[in-house]
Image (cartoon, coloured by chain):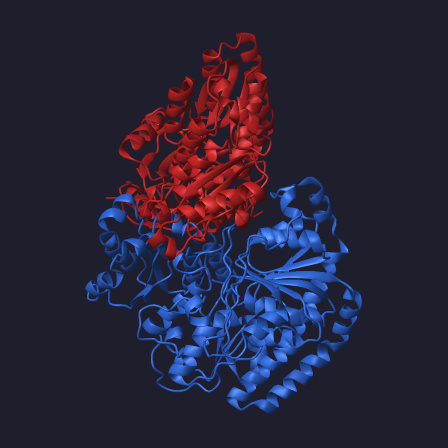
């Protein structure tokens, strides 16, 4: 079903993409049963651990648009996590040689009386103050469980302020209780940008590539890489300006480093403005970058240039990769990441010669917004050997149980708060926090050396594990990892 | 009506309760709320608290019912009961604290009835309603302490005349709570007083269970932890005193004298301890004088932080460091009565060294208020408080830059250094603070 930009909020992933957060089985089983329109239903848990909030995911993208502001219509605690959005902002600005400045966010401080009498007055005051204080080019109004349950009329407040606040003021529907899939918050942010900021194209910019990402650490590398084939990346949406976002409709192609992140925005730009969205596997490792660059090349008619680029990059790195593979041969690992990375890194770790014993995915989109199954999982499932595969919204008790049973050499994780538990078990953890880890040929080689370094000295985790206890009962370690996952209805 | 706040310096009530439980050995929280609440609150506290990190069953491993829209409509009590039963099996702990979020409190789940069923069967489960909209971290910490005091601490135990409990610390809101508690415990120990700290990694849950043995509760705040101390007195008959957090030799000496008088410590011990500790401070400060005076390191102080720290830091820089406190902003969300208590405490600083006090939670408005204050100064050079030193949180760096002032962060959030066992309490804590402040002034050399 096409993306609808005429409605005020993006439907959650459970409804839109058949996203699930509960499954235990194998990779091939999951792929087979979600192929060609067939879907599986989600399994709930009778014991669960905290996961993440859609509002945090929406705000992590929106708070770093350099000349926009956020009004978070919520109790104070919902803006507590702006501490780490501000960290990303501080070092992001530092690396871009910008001055030290805090993110521009106001929280409406909803209190008990507001949950009874409504919080629209505070919201109005908050929007006016954000306009007065920051003079932003746009204001995003993010919602919360409290504002959502009491049903504050956010659109009404915004429309009443139309004359006083002469910039786009855009509601972002990211209440934490709407979805267990925190990536629904990304879509809420993209929906707001698409409906409130992006303008119809005035002219095509044939060399412009929309590059959907998080922190953009590989800006210089990608700019050089694209420059060699006459293209120019625009990194969105953190650290972009409102003006840059207005004109993403003029780009020649949209690509993403994370297919979980990119699905909504990429598909919407394609459907709305005819900008091709690169639907290949993500650009991690040799196979990833090559498929991805070919996808970009095909979209802009630069197939020949891309082949030349791939050949050069491969030639520059192949020998080193062979050496790394030799060193890592026989290493055993468990993976726990968001879906795009969990799927993509099965390929990456293959290329490095690392054997994956089990993969856990923080959720699973049965299909993307353009209708297809995620390409990286298809590729992984096409391999000869199957592996056990689980889906859980970062349910660490399951991961810990699995890790203690399998005792891998390495745990590869993505998303904060997961690798720590492997480390406390004495397992060397390699967190993939930077989205450009293993990006491209050179990134894969760098990643390989980083893993070798991690394995070269394991003293920290070995000694730590002797000294710390994990929270679980002995009973739990004796159970199947999925004891609390409900059985699928047959 | 309360107002909006730019980038709040705390978590919600749920967050304050959560980090308090997370700091107590062998206690685990069961959060009854939406999926992200615990992760967001814990993440904010553990990152903003100088990268405190996970201890036992916290962080992303916090048990949580992760309720959604369905439970908003049909209620979440069954899901909570299921989660408690499972947590008792999966997690190895000695006390389980059910705490709630906005959703649960708005829809009105009867969480006390659900928990009551488990308590009836002898399960060590306690409960506090901590919906985020009820207040900030300090409010939530008060809620969970009241629950602990009334539902967990044993009643009817014999008092120990030399045992005290230390209260008033909210983990991460005082980024240095562990170090501060341990240092105060050490100092009181020198006087022959045993102090229960509860919130350090070296505490035993048994001490909390038997906390009613204490003869005195010392609340290191005029506002935070006061209500639980009143509940404690009512429930267990232990009186309490509010003491400001003592930083540096002058404040700490006074603190020790008051406690010694209250608990009848003999004079000889008291005088010896004060003399020894003061000597420790001054034997390091003495040689630092070369730098301090040669470089003219006296500064105007701008102190921004919570109620406990603003007074303590102002007092230290005024009493011991010889600086001039100029302006101070208390960033907690306080009611009128609490504001009066904080203002009254500040009045114990002599008028000529007493800073202008404002209550302001909003970072940019602090800057505006300071600039208003500066504009009123009659100064031909336009720099009435030069050179200045801003002692605040990591959010106050732009304010310091605007003043061309030095900056050091001692209040939440602290994200530009890690905090482990550092402390500011006591004689030695004062020495640490001097060391850090002066280090900032020479850091570009």
Q: Does B233 sit left or right of A428 as displayed?
A: left
Q: Which chain is blue?
A: A
Above or below, comparing residue A255 to residue B5 in the picture? below
Q: Give the percent coordinates (x, y) of residue B47.
A: 51, 48
Quadrant location of the N terminus of chain B in the rendered image: top left
A246 left or right of B187 in image: left
- What is chain B's hue in the picture? red
Residue B55 visible somewhere in the drawing: no
Q: Is residue A413 above or below residue A346?
A: above
Q: Quadrant of residue A326?
A: bottom right
Q: Position of residue B346 (x, y in %)?
A: 35, 28
Closer-to-camera residue (A221/A356): A356
Q: Nearer the viewer, residue A440 or B122?
A: B122
Q: Toward which corner of the image does residue B201 lie, by quadrant?
A: top right
* Residue under the point 53% across and 57% down: A486
Residue B333 in sight: yes
Instruction: Tell me: residue A440, above or below residue A86.
Output: below
């Amino acid at each position: 079903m096409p993306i609808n930009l005429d409605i005020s909020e993006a439907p959650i992933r459970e409804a839109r993409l058949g996203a699930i957060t509960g499954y235990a089985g194998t990779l091939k089983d999951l792929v087979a049963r979600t192929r060609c329109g067939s879907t599986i239903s989600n399994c709930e848990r009778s014991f669960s651990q905290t996961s993440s909030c859609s509002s945090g995911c929406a705000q992590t993208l929106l708070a770093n648009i350099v000349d926009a502001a956020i009004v978070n219509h919520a109790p104070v605690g919902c803006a507590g996590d702006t501490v780490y959005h501000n960290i990303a902002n501080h070092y992001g600005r530092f690396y871009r040689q910008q001055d030290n400045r805090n993110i521009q966010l106001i929280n409406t401080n909803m209190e008990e009386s507001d949950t009874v009498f409504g919080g629209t007055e505070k919201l109005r005051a908050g929007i006016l103050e954000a306009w007065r204080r920051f003079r932003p080019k746009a204001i995003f109004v993010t919602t919360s469980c409290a504002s959502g349950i009491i049903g504050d009329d956010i659109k009404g407040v915004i429309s009443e302020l139309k004359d006083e606040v002469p910039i786009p003021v855009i509601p972002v529907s990211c209440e934490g209780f709407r979805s267990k899939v925190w990536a629904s918050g990304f879509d809420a942010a993209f929906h707001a940008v698409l409906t409130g900021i992006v303008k119809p194209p005035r002219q095509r910019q044939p060399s412009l590539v929309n590059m959907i990402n998080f922190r953009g650490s590989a800006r210089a590398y990608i700019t050089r890489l694209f420059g060699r084939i006459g293209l120019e990346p625009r990194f969105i949406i953190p650290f972009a300006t409102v003006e840059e976002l207005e004109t993403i409709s003029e780009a020649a192609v949209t690509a993403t480093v994370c297919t979980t992140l990119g699905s909504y925005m990429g598909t919407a730009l394609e459907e709305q403005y005819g900008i091709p969205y690169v639907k290949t596997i993500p650009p991690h490792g040799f196979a990833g970058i090559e498929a991805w660059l070919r996808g970009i090349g095909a979209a802009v008619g630069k197939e020949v240039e891309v082949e030349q680029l791939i050949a050069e990059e491969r030639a520059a790195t192949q020998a080193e990769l062979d050496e790394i593979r030799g060193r890592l041969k026989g290493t055993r690992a468990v993976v726990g990441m968001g879906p795009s990375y969990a799927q993509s890194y099965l390929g990456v770790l293959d290329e490095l010669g690392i054997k994956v014993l089990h993969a856990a995915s923080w959720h699973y989109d049965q299909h993307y917004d353009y209708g297809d199954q995620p390409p990286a999982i298809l590729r992984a499932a096409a391999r000869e050997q199957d592996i056990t595969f689980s889906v859980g919204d970062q349910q660490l008790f399951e991961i810990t149980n699995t890790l203690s049973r399998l005792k891998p050499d390495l745990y590869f994780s993505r998303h904060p708060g997961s690798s720590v538990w492997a480390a406390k078990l004495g397992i060397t953890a390699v967190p993939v926090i930077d989205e450009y880890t293993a990006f491209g040929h050179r990134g894969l080689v760098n990643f390989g050396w980083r893993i070798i370094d991690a394995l070269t000295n394991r003293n920290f985790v070995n000694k730590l594990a002797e000294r710390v206890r994990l929270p679980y009962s002995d009973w739990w370690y004796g159970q199947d990892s999925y004891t609390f996952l409900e059985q699928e209805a047959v | 009506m309360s107002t909006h706040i730019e980038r709040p310096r705390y978590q919600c009530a749920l967050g304050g309760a959560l980090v308090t439980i997370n700091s107590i050995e062998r206690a685990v929280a069961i959060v009854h709320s939406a999926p992200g609440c615990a992760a967001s609150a814990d993440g904010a506290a553990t990152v903003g608290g100088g990268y405190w990190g996970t201890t036992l069953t916290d962080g992303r491993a916090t048990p949580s019912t992760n309720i959604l829209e369905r439970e908003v409509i049909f209620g979440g009590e069954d899901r909570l009961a299921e989660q408690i039963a499972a947590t008792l099996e999966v997690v190895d702990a000695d006390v389980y604290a059910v705490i709630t979020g906005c959703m649960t409190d708005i829809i009105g789940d009867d969480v006390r009835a659900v928990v009551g069923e488990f308590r009836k069967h002898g399960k060590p489960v306690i409960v506090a309603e901590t919906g985020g909209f009820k207040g900030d971290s300090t409010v939530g910490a008060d809620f969970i302490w009241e629950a602990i005091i009334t539902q967990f601490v044993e009643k009817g135990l014999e008092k120990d005349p030399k045992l005290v409990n230390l209260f008033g610390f909210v983990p991460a809101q005082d980024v240095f709570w562990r170090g501060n508690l341990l240092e105060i415990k050490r100092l009181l120990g020198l006087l022959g007083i045993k102090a229960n700290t509860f919130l350090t990694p070296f505490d035993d849950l048994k001490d909390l269970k038997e906390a009613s043995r204490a003869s005195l509760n010392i609340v290191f705040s005029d506002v935070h932890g006061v209500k639980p101390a009143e509940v404690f007195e009512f429930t267990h008959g232990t009186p309490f005193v509010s003491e400001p957090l003592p930083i540096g030799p002058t404040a700490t000496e006074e603190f020790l004298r008051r406690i010694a008088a209250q608990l009848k410590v003999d004079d000889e011990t008291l005088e010896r301890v004060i003399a020894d500790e003061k000597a420790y401070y001054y034997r390091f400060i003495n040689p630092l004088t070369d730098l301090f005076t040669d470089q003219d390191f006296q500064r105007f102080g701008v102190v921004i932080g919570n109620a406990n720290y603003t007074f303590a830091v102002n007092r230290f820089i005024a009493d011991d460091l010889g600086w001039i406190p100029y302006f101070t902003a208390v960033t907690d969300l306080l009611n009128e009565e609490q504001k009066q208590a904080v203002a009254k405490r500040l009045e114990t600083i002599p008028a000529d060294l007493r800073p202008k006090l404002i209550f302001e939670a909003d970072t940019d408005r602090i800057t505006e208020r300071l600039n208003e204050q500066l504009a009123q100064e009659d100064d031909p050079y336009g720099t009435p408080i030069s050179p200045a030193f801003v002692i605040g949180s990591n959010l106050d760096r732009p304010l310091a830059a605007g003043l061309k002032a030095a900056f050091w962060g001692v209040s939440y959030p602290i994200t530009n250094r890690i905090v482990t066992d550092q402390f500011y309490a006591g004689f030695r804590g004062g020495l640490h603070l001097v060391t850090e402040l002066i280090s900032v002034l020479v850091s570009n050399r």
